[in-house]
Image: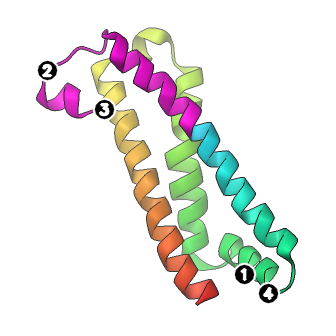
Amino acid sequence: MAGLLFFNSSTKDGNVSYLHGLDVKVSFVELFFLFILFVGMFYQGGSAAHVAKAALSTGGLSTLLWLGVIGLGLVLPIGLNFALPHGVKHSHGFVIFNSLIVLVGVMSLRYYILYAGQIFVG
């Protein structure tokens, strides 16, 4: 995104295509790691399972997780990548839009981990 905004690079470059493809792969890995995090907490049993259930389903932080992290930051970029034609995916505006929604998802995940960890575990 910085290269497109500040250095006037083209989306036709091989580097942009490579990074765009890498973004989708990293999103799938991040989904897997989030899944493993909560499955691990459920299988610990006891209070860890109750904390995991509360963190996934209680209050505004669960909305942040499902809409901000999972929906906006992970599923939407993956879905757009598979649904849109190649010409649209590699356009200047789409690359910037996709980068911004991924950044919002990353910041939402950091906020969620920090505050849900303090509220439900601490």
Residue position marked by numbered label 2 in the rendering: 8
Viewer-side residue, 5 vs 39: 39
Say whether marks 1 and 4 touch (CB < 8 Å): yes
Is residue 18 toward the left or the right of residue 29 in the image?
Answer: left
Q: Residues within 10 Å of mark 2 (few under 14, many from 20)?
A: few
Q: Does 60 sit left or right of 50 as displayed?
A: left
Please tell me whether residue 12 belongs to the stretch shown in magenta.
yes
Distance in Å between CA atoms under marks 1 and 4 = 6 Å
Q: Which quadrant holds residue 47?
A: bottom right
Image height check: is 67 above or below 79? below
User: Which label is found at residue 51?
Assistant: 1
- Magenta part mainly helix, strand or loop? helix
Q: Taking 36 as reference, is 63 above or below it?
A: below
For image coordinates 78% across by 65% down, the residue present is: 40
Residue 47's label in the rendered image is: 4
The reply to whether dot 3 and dot 2 touch (C-beta < 8 Å) is: no
On the rendered image, what quadrant is the N terminus found in? Answer: top left
Amino acid type shown at disc 3: Ile
Q: State how far apart marks 3 and 2 are (Cα).
A: 13 Å
What's under tag 1, amino acid-wise? Val
Q: How far apart are the two marked residues, 2 and 1, measured between alpha carbons?
A: 47 Å
The number of callouts visible is 4
Specify which label sits upstream in the sequence, 3 or 2.
Answer: 2
Residue 39 at x, y = what percent?
Answer: 79, 62
